[in-house]
Amino acid sequence: MQAIARFLDSHMIFVRRLIKTIIISLFAIQVLVVFSQVIWRFVFNNPFSWSEELARYLQVWLILLTASVCIRKGRHLAVDFATHVLPFRINKILKLITMVCIMGFTWILIIFSVQMILITIHQITPAMRVPILVVYLAFPVAGIFMFMESLIVFLKLAGVKDKAGFDAIYGG
């Protein structure tokens, strides 16, 4: 399992760099759009009609793409009060179950988001007049990245034999 995890991990390096670049770029664009909207609204009293919609859609992309980074680093919001006192084996089993649940959820997300895209393929956004496909595509794309990252974490955790290795992989 460790060999498969290393193989997948090594092939995700370029994808991770690309996602990081996209996240940074989308955030910079969002900051500029929202800042310019504030200036145009309060200084010139002539707000843009499209800026709030663009900021909302950029936020959707940002959140979903960043979720894969959070899965890889083990930084998603979690209730882990009791896991600190549990024995290593129980904690490992819980983390493995969590990864299986995440993989199941992302698989469902991918399937239903593709169905949603197919249903709404000809719709356009109200203010910007772009295909809603651009927005909805965030769900299957990010779902694939989240699935891959959770699979890699699962494979790494499955091969761990001691607490030190567990802490190194999942941030213990």
Image (cartoon, helix red, strand yellow):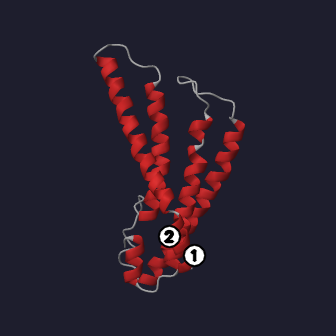
| Residue occupying image coordinates x 44% and y 28% | 52
Assess disc 2: are there few (<14), some (14-19) or many (≥20) residues with their C-alpha within 10 Å of its C-alpha: many
Q: Which residue position is annotated with label 1? A: 4
Q: Residue furthest top?
A: 45
Q: Amino acid at mark 2?
A: Val
The N terminus, quarter of image: bottom right
From what the image shows, is residue 12 above or below residue 110? below
Q: CA distance from mark 1 to mark 2?
A: 11 Å
Q: Residue at x 51, y 74 (%)?
A: 6
**Residue 103 at x, y percent in the picture:** 58, 63
116 in relation to 11, above or below: above
**Secondary-structure class at tag 1:** helix
For the point 49% across and 74% down, the residue is 94
Q: Is residue 152 left or right of residue 77?
A: right
- Where is residue 96 drawn, in percent x and y? 52, 73
Q: Is residue 133 visible?
A: yes
Q: What amino acid type is highlighted by mark number 1?
A: Ile
Disc with the residue nearer the chain's start (1 vs 2): 1
Q: Looking at this view, is 130 or 74 the one in front?
A: 130
Task: Report helix, strand or loop for mark 2.
Answer: helix
Would residue 70 be found to the left or right of residue 131 on screen? left
User: Quick check: can you spot residue 99?
Assistant: no
Q: Circles 1 and 2: CB distance less than 8 Å?
A: no
**Quarter-of-image position of residue 3:** bottom right
Name the residue at the bottom extreme: 161
In percent of the image, x 47 and y 82: which residue is there?
A: 160
On the image, the x and y values in percent for residue 58 come to 46, 38
Of marks 1 and 2, the one in the foreground: 1
Q: Residue beneath label 2, please?
A: 153
In this rendering, the answer to whether 93 lies above or below 103 is below
